[in-house]
């Protein structure tokens, strides 16, 4: 109050602020008693932003403000007691406690999704609502969703529920499976209580609602109820909202209300960081060298789950053989049956040159020659980059295979492609296409 008094004219402070009282502060929800009804609208509409900014400057926290008159005080206190009782009830969030922001590895392909998820976790219901995360399977969407839920439960008393579209559909269709009308009504009420009496609803793989018209209708109603109540909704899909053509238009349009954000497949640098994170605190951590990490990163280009499976396979093989160290040769023996197409070990510079030249419609002689036109120079850079990434050949050896070029030229070409891959999605697609051809 003292800070507000300094900000306002004396008459204004005496008229609207002097006689207000803080009745309760629970779960960042302030209940404030005011003398008359008119104080409610004046404080909300005229001084709302000033009050919120002042509170934030003092405690660095956002508050929900609830104004009541003295006559309403008893009812407000009863509501608070009920809320306290609700927070003490047993509630299954369905969250995986092991998935959090601390063990989510961030790179250029998922940084926007990570930052957006953190923003929602810190301000649920107030920013990016709904948050719609999309991308191919195995890229970390589910990890981020659990991380949001775990952060919110750890830092507030808000009720969080994680579910999948399959679970939602099963729960909803279960209503029709009950023959007794009374039991059916009770089940329906329990269904609504489960999905609507929450502060944060997290629903995974929304694309599986395609074709389920009645379930889509119920989810539409649930979405509207939560949205109008300022409750946070977080959704994931393997496609963007615009690409979910078989979902109802009114659902797709609502998914666009907040923030749709995509996750791309991890680039080479991020795959290496993910592998290091997965190896941390394991028996392999001090036995494995960087060459093996790069070998695995080059062999698993699709998704994080493939990386995890590869690491688990290597750990099991290591436990059985008990080697003194893990080098590329040992890793190749351990994973040769698991990695169906090991482009790292099965391709030579010669093969790479042939595929790159075919892809860019030039000749291998062009790649090895002295021509410096953009049509040839860029594919040459790509071929050198792939020769370094997909083989164990040295810089001098690669230079020799490209017309006797100096090793510094090879390094320059590799760095050029590596830098451009961070922002050029068209180049990234070309690299992936060439790897598939290999």
Image (spheres, rainbow, N blue to C red):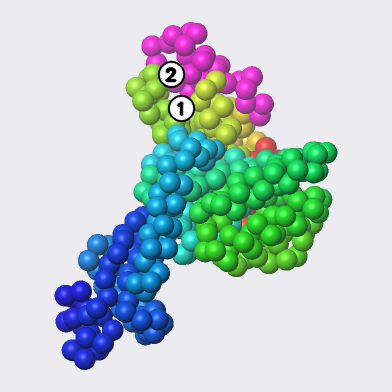
Report how many numbered discs are placed on residues in the image.
Answer: 2
Please rate how many residues cluster around mark 1, counting C-alpha atoms within 10 Å: few if below 14, some from 14 to 19, many from 20.
Answer: some
Left or right, 409 with respect to 228, comes to left
The N terminus - image quarter = bottom left
In-image side of 369 versus 114 (left or right): right
Q: Position of residue 65 (x, y in %)?
A: 37, 68
| Discs 2, 1 touching: Cβ within 8 Å | yes
Which residue in the protein does label 2 denote? 326
Q: At x 31% / y 59%, what residue is drawn? A: 25
Please name whichever residue, 53 or 358, is drawn nearer the observer in this view of the structure: 53
Range of the magenta residues? 314-341
Quadrant where the image shows the C terminus: top right
> In the image as oriented, which residue stretches furthest toward the top?
321
* Residue 254 found in image quarter: bottom right
Q: Measured along the vertical axis of the image, is residue 172 above or below residue 427?
A: above
Residue 271 in sight? no
Disc 1: which residue: 292
Q: Is residue 300 above or below residue 235?
A: above
Helix, strand or loop at disc 2?
loop
Q: Where residue 323 sits: x, y (%)?
A: 43, 10
How far is the residue under mark 2 from the one under mark 1? Answer: 8 Å
Q: Residue at x 74, y 40 (%)?
A: 183
| Residue found at x 38% / y 44% | 154
């Amino acid at each position: 109050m003292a800070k507000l008094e300094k900000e306002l004219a004396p008459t204004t402070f005496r008229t609207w602020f002097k006689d207000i009282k803080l009745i309760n502060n629970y779960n960042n929800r302030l209940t404030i008693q005011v003398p008359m009804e008119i104080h409610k609208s004046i404080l909300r509409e005229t001084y709302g932003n000033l009050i919120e900014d002042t509170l934030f400057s003092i405690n660095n926290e956002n508050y929900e403000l609830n104004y009541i008159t003295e006559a309403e005080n008893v009812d407000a206190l009863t509501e608070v007691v009920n809320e306290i009782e609700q927070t003490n009830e047993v509630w299954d969030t369905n969250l995986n406690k092991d998935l959090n922001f601390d063990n989510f590895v961030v790179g250029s392909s998922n940084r926007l999704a990570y930052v957006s998820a953190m923003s929602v976790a810190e301000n649920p219901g107030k920013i990016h609502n709904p948050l719609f995360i999309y991308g191919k399977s195995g890229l970390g969407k589910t990890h981020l969703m659990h991380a949001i839920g775990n952060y919110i439960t750890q830092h507030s008393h808000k009720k969080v529920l994680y579910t999948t579209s399959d679970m939602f559909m099963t729960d909803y269709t279960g209503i029709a499976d009950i023959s007794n009308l009374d039991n059916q009504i009770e089940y329906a009420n329990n269904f609504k209580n489960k999905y609507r009496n929450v502060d944060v609803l997290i629903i995974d793989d929304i694309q599986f609602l395609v074709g389920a018209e009645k379930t889509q209708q119920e989810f539409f109603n649930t979405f509207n109820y939560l949205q109008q109540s300022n409750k946070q909704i977080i959704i994931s899909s393997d496609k963007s909202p615009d690409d979910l053509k078989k979902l109802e238009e009114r659902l797709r349009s609502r998914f666009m209300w907040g923030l749709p954000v995509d996750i791309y497949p991890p680039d080479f640098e991020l795959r290496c960081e993910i592998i290091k994170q997965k190896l941390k605190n394991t028996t392999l951590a001090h036995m494995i060298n960087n060459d093996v990490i790069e070998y695995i990163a080059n062999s698993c280009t699709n998704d994080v789950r493939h990386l995890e499976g590869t690491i688990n396979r290597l750990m099991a093989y290591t436990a059985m053989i008990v080697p003194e160290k893990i080098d590329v040769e040992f890793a190749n023996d351990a994973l040769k049956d698991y990695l169906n197409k090991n482009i790292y070990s099965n391709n030579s510079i010669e093969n790479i040159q042939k595929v790159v030249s075919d892809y860019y419609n030039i000749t291998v002689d062009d790649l090895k020659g002295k021509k410096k036109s953009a049509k040839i120079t860029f594919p040459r850079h790509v071929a050198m980059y792939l020769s370094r990434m997909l083989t164990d050949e040295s810089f001098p050896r690669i230079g020799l295979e490209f017309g006797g070029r100096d090793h510094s030229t090879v390094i320059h070409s590799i760095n050029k492609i590596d830098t451009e891959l961070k922002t050029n999605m068209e180049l990234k697609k070309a690299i992936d296409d060439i790897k598939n051809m290999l």
